[in-house]
């Protein structure tokens, strides 16, 4: 039977192979020379194979392009990224200075400042070029949003912009109110997918005389918001509010314990969130511990929103003018959020001031409908930046100057935080033990699991020491790519996609004449660094000995591909990245924007 199959015409065998999924077709290619010839003769299978090997998936764009034309376009796009050779370069002058901004989905948006108040009432939008579709991009503006926007977040694939308004306290209300307006991105109208008034409302539990800072993220039908005071003493507890933005219902209010500060977060899915925290588990010695924690939220979760309890504790109903009739009742408290898994980061001997986490777009986010191909949505890295302060001991329990701020970034593989990862969590995780580390003292033990750094960190992350990241220009990670500036002002991109790494190693082995087909695993040992043109594969470990930051040696081995540009950028430029672009914003003159398209 097998011999008869091989005697069929090439066109017929190829047609049968095209009905297989790409993984099966790739395996079949290795069976014999005849199947290899048939697979290689199919432009469709070649295109799909190139996508998978490079860590991409096919997009949803309706196009008349043939698969040969799509393959040619993808090769141009992929080669441009792997050599950091942009296919176009544009410089734009934006209309006015901005105080708030966002880069997402190929759109750069700015809120125009009036010069003295944080936020803005007017907005300008710049759509960046799309070489896949041939669109050159467009500009549009709104002169007045109707209120001062304190922060915002876009989701261009569903034409959504979420605008945050703070209604300041009055002698009657005595506390601020936060409102999130859900508008269309292209015409500033109530979003058509919204089934309510178009405004989400919440009242903070504490006052903020200097105003608020916000962290907001949208994933599918979920919108999450963390708010913290801009200045003054930190609150005893932090809150993250999570809504279904379409229906307007609150899914959860995640509240930290008094010994844990929520610093930032990212949504893992429509029912799980990853929060970066600082835990004061040894407050008496001013030692703190950086950690990450996953929480489940929404109906059926341990953190399900209890409308009756919350209304009793916070008087959650608001009047039509956005103010509260009553101030919060301090006699009743919302329960503290219960984590699913707590991940400890490297133990520091310095004081951890804050922990910032970034990942764009959220895990599982589908590509824009206009794209021919996109980075695999299920493969991500999370950039976790820890700001630690080294304080000199002045004796007698006194801390004196000088002090030094040290920053390090951990780039963590997304599979660590997947609900059912393909790693032995029965070994890695253990029920919460009885020890002195306090996550939240009031929470019963045994309700969450813990993972020490040594159990998961070394194999699934890569550390970058002394890598300060801006808390303003935060779009430095997209998918599996991380961008930074080198000391000589060149652009450095790290790519952690495992499929692309294997493919690059495979091509290098073929060039060396020791490999023809199949999997490349096992050929290179853990301390090998190879190059492929301007691309470098790094598999050797990064080792940080005990220093002023860590109280033990930190070693990480997550492999990656690295490419450094042969062109330089001005030192005043903040570097950012998205699916198709490297964007440079001038920190001294924020009306200037440079865009490199790949």
Image (cartoon, rainbow, N blue to C red):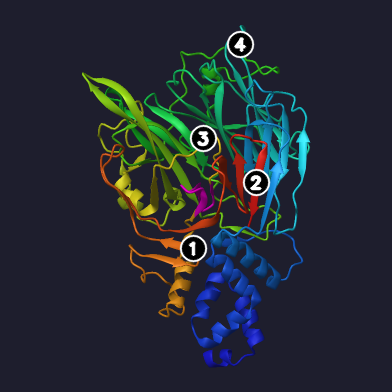
Quarter of the rendering occupied by the N terminus: bottom right
Task: Determine the CA span between mark 4 and mark 2.
Answer: 45 Å
Q: Nearer the viewer, residue 278 or 35?
A: 278
Counting from the top left corner in percent of width and height, residue 159 is at 72, 42
Residue contact at pointers 1 and 2, CB within 8 angstroms: no
Residue under the point 39% across and 51% down: 462
Mark 4 or mark 1, which is nearer the start of the sequence? Answer: 4
Counting from the top left corner in percent of width and height, residue 28 is at 52, 79
Mark nearest the camera among 4 and 2 is: 2
Q: Is residue 447 left or right of residue 113?
A: left
Mark 2 or mark 4, which is nearer the start of the sequence? Answer: 4
Counting from the top left corner in percent of width and height, residue 527 is at 33, 62
Q: Is residue 488 left or right of residue 186?
A: left
Q: Which residues are magenta?
A: 477-493
Mark 2 or mark 1, which is nearer the start of the sequence? Answer: 1
Residue ID for mark 2: 594
Residue ID for mark 4: 173
Counting from the top left corner in percent of width and height, residue 245 is at 64, 35
Quarter of the rendering occupied by the C terminus: bottom right
Residue contact at pointers 3 and 4, CB within 8 angstroms: no
Residue ID for mark 3: 471
Residue contact at pointers 4 and 2, CB within 8 angstroms: no
């Amino acid at each position: 039977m097998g011999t008869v199959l091989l005697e069929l015409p090439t066109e017929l065998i190829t047609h049968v192979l095209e009905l297989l999924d790409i993984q099966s077709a790739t395996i079949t290619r290795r069976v014999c020379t005849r199947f290899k010839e048939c697979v290689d003769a199919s432009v469709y299978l070649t295109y799909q194979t190139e996508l998978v090997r490079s860590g991409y998936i096919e997009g949803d764009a309706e196009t008349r392009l043939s698969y040969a034309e799509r393959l040619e376009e993808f090769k141009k796009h992929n080669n441009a990224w792997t050599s950091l050779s942009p296919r176009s370069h544009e410089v734009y002058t934006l209309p006015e200075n901005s105080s708030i901004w966002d880069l997402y989905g190929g759109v750069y948006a700015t809120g125009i400042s009036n010069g003295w108040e944080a936020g803005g009432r007017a907005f300008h939008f710049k759509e960046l070029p799309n070489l896949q579709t041939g669109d050159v991009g467009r500009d549009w503006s709104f002169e007045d949003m109707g209120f001062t926007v304190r922060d915002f977040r876009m989701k261009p694939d569903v034409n959504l912009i979420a605008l945050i308004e703070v209604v300041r306290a009055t002698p009657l209300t005595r506390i601020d109110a936060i409102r999130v307006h859900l508008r269309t991105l292209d015409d500033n109208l109530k979003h058509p997918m919204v089934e309510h008034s178009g405004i989400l409302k919440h009242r903070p539990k504490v006052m903020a005389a200097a105003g608020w800072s916000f962290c907001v993220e949208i994933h599918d039908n979920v919108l999450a918001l963390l708010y913290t005071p801009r200045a003054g003493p930190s609150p005893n507890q932090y809150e993250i509010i999570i809504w279904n933005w379409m229906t307007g219902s609150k899914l959860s209010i995640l509240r930290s314990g008094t010994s844990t500060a929520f610093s930032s977060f990212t949504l893992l899915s429509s029912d799980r969130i990853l929060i970066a925290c600082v835990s004061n588990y040894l407050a008496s010695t001013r030692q703190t511990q950086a950690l990450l924690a996953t929480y489940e939220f929404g109906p059926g979760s341990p953190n399900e929103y209890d409308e009756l309890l919350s209304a009793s504790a916070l008087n959650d109903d608001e009047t039509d003018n956005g103010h509260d009739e009553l101030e919060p009742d301090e006699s009743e408290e919302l329960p503290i959020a219960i984590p699913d898994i707590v991940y400890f980061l490297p133990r520091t001997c310095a004081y951890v001031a804050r922990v910032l986490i970034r990942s764009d777009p959220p895990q599982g986010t589908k590509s824009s409908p206009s794209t021919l191909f996109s980075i695999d949505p299920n493969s991500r890295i999370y950039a976790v930046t820890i700001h630690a302060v080294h304080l000199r001991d002045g004796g007698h329990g006194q801390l004196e100057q000088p002090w030094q701020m040290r920053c390090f970034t951990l780039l963590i593989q997304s599979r660590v935080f997947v609900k059912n990862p393909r790693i032995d969590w029965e070994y890695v995780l253990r029920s919460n033990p009885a020890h002195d580390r306090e996550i939240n003292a009031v929470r019963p033990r045994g309700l969450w699991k813990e993972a020490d750094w040594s159990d998961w960190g070394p194999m699934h992350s890569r550390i970058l020491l002394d890598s300060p990241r801006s808390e303003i220009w935060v779009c430095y990670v997209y998918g599996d790519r991380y961008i930074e500036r080198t000391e000589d002002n060149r652009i450095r991109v790290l790519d952690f996609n495992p499929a692309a790494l294997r493919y690059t190693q495979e091509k290098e082995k073929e060039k060396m004449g020791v490999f023809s087909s199949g999997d490349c695993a096992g050929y290179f040992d853990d301390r090998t660094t190879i190059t492929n043109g301007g691309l470098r594969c790094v598999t050797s470990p990064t080792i940080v000995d005990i220093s002023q930051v860590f109280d033990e040696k930190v070693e990480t081995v997550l492999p990656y591909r690295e490419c450094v540009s042969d062109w330089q950028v001005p030192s005043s430029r903040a570097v950012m990245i998205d699916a198709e672009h490297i964007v440079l914003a001038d920190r001294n003159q924020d009306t200037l924007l440079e865009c490199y398209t790949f």
